[in-house]
Image (cartoon, rainbow, N blue to C red):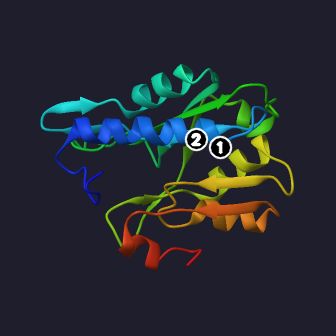
Amino acid sequence: ISETPYKSNVENYKKFQQSFCDEFCRITKPDGFIVICQTDRKMGGEIISNHITYHNQITENNWKLKDYKLVVRNSVESKDQFRFNYQNCLIFTKTGKIARKGEFMKNILTYEMKKSPVLDLFVWNPDFVELMIKSLTKEKDKVIDCFSGSGIVPHTAKKMNRQYFGVEINKKMYQHSLIH
């Protein structure tokens, strides 16, 4: 949010979130999955519960929350008053089946994440990305990352023989991404 035009306008950002959730629901096949993995934010002395906005908008489009995980970044010892050290991972589908086995069975996942050398953002661990792709797709399926950041999701999807597409609003991040 800090690197977008929504930097200081929470209400406009929520409207933006709702519009892209509607679009995710429109372009995803009923047996496909919408995975939202995002941290909540602290802005202006208030917690902005992004995962609740996503949940409400996607279920309003008649999708079902099929799984929910907490993804801890590195450890739980962080005392950062501005950033949470975990992500809420919400997995929606209308009719899709999840391959629930191994690491995917856990409700709390811990993965080492590194800060991007380009921006002050954490980059997803490739093992986590691979787990999500392996559990929710099969070869040749499409994987779309509309907030591609470092490009780790499309990069991993390509390595796993999936069709892939990534979009990133931040020009600097896009120019340094793995898929550029």
Judge whether residue 123 can be spotted in this image: yes
Q: In which image quadrant can residue 80 be found?
A: top left
Q: Residue at x 29, y 44 (%)?
A: 83
Task: Please tell me whether mark 1 sits on a helix, a strand or a loop.
Answer: helix
Location of residue 38 in the rendering, given as x and y in whole percent from the top left corner: 45, 42
> Does residue 117 show up?
no
Q: Which residue is mark 2?
A: 24
Please tell me whether mark 2 sits on a helix, a strand or a loop: helix
Q: Quadrant of residue 82?
A: top left
The amino acid at mark 1 is: Ile
Q: Say the numbered circle drawn on residue 27.
A: 1
Q: Does 109 sit above or below residue 130?
A: above
Residue 17's label in the rendered image is none
Residue at 49 percent of width and 25 percent of height = 55
What residue lies at 41% left-to-right and 25% top-to-bottom? Answer: 52
Three-letter code, disc 2:
Phe
